[in-house]
Amino acid sequence: MRAFGYDVDQLVVAHVVLAVVPVLAGLVLAMPVGWWAHRSPVARRVLVPLSGALYTIPSLALIVVMPVLLGTGILSPVNVGVTLTIYTLALLVRSVAEALDAVPATVTTAAVAMGYRPAGLLFAVQLPLAVPVLTAGVRVASVSSFSLVTVGALVGIDSLGTLMTSGFEQDYAQMVAAGIVGSLVLAFVFDALWLGLGRVLTPWSRARAGV
Amino acid sequence: MFGQLLAWFVAPGRWSGGTGVPARVLEHLGYTALAVVVAAAIALPVGALVGHTRRGGLAVVGVANGLRALPELGVLVLFVLLLGLGLLAPTLALVLLAIPPLLAGAYAGVAGADAGAVDAARGMGMREHQVLLQVEVPAAVPLVLGGLRFATLQVVATATIAAYVGLGGLGRYIIDGFAVRDFPQMLGGAVVVAVLSIVVELVLQGLGRLVTPGPDRLRLRHRRPAGPATDPVPVPSRKARP
């Protein structure tokens, strides 16, 4: 679909890829780090404030610093991707640690007594029970990722944000509005997907609610 | 690269004048303070009222979450296109983006005030506005401050982007640097704004600790035993507060 002189499909695809891949990557990275923070109080005292500080740095600043840290070009989409991955990781380290904390000790002791080794305990018992808290964290990360991806347009990285910068240069409000609405719709669609995925992964919560 | 960055930091005029770092930092903090104060003046009373009456709570949470999904860049640009260049349009956009966390904090804080304490206040004959101002609002302080912190950081970050629509502040270095592909300047601006936001966060965290009663208030608790024994009421009742 062409509109406003752009191939909008291409912008949408770029937007989704640049927003979703970092959320998935951040989630995968947050698992071991969050698990470490859950296991070791010392690690937690370092990791949680450190992720808080990373989350504090404005997105435009992080995107601009990335070429120095990664050796990428200033116009590389990787700068945006890694920035959003860092935000997701920073947000989810705490979620993972708290989600694992929230698993009742009776459940973990019972699993240990049944012969679960640490890895089995983590993947078969603790993580499934942590899914609701994790889903909440992923939804927050995803919504902000879909909105922050547009910032990349300021340094020439395409997404629906391109409609915003280009609309500004052409004094064309409808074009900007289209970018905003598109970004919102994509954020809400993926929010619903995460919510649905969280439900599918926790069938027992529906059974308990009698649905 | 680090050499060039260092050169940028020590370049003549970098630390003085209207385009120097101190002036840009002050501009940045000025926009941030203006937007957060206006947003707080709107969001805190509304959030507190909804939390007190418990009517429209779902709507508040819905609006707050919906606003949170708005792309900051789009909102800024759209406001400027509709209202014109200048301070007004970007400030309104920043206010709009600062409202959700403040609203959510005030609502959750007041609605989450200890039900027993609220009940007791009514039983003592307090009027509704007294219950709100003397019981629920003090209980809401930690969550309101959490919202304030988040809103402030959001605005510091978005004010950086606002340089694109002509605002001053630290984003100027990044936007102007990109326009002429002056990478050291972009990097210098990014470093300063990163440091500024971490400092702001630490200051707000410290402020939060200072005004929050309870076990977090380590320093004040240490001071208490050393104080003169003028308080005839045994202290433990105070410490028992969660």
Image (cartoon, rainbow, N blue to C red):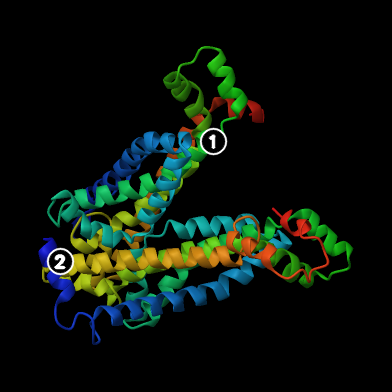
Examine the image and state in which quarter residue A149 appears.
bottom left
Front residue of B212 and A79: B212
Q: Residues within 10 Å of mark 1 (few under 14, many from 20)?
A: some
Q: Quadrant of residue A107?
A: top right
Is residue A79 depicted above or below B227 in this figure?
above
The residue lying at 45 percent from left, 36 percent from top is A40
Chain identity of mark 2: B
Q: What is the C-alpha distance between the residues marked 1 and 2?
A: 43 Å
**Secondary structure beneath label 1:** helix
Residue located 26% across and 71% down the image: A168
Which residue is denoted by mark 2 in the rendering?
B5
Residue identified by numbered label 1: A101
In the displayed structure, would residue B33 be above or below residue A50? below
Position of residue A154 relative to residue A7, above or below, is below
Describe the element under mark 2 as helix, strand or loop: helix
Of the residues shown, which amino acid type is indicated by label 2?
Answer: Leu
User: Which residue is painted at 20% across and 56% down in the image?
Assistant: A157
Front-most of A110 and B83? A110
Please name whichever residue, A205 or B147, is drawn nearer the observer in this view of the structure: B147
Q: Are marks 1 and 2 on the same chain?
A: no
| Horizontal arrangement in the rendering, residue A193 relative to residue B111 (left or right) | left
The residue at 20%/62% (across/down) is: A155
Q: Chain of mark 1?
A: A
Percent coordinates x, y for residue A113 in the rendering: 56, 14
- Does any portion of residue A185 appear in the rendered image? no
Q: Bin the neighbour count of mark 2 within 10 Å (Cα to Cα): few under 14, some 14-19, many 20 and up.
A: some
- The one nearer the camera, B164 or A7, is B164
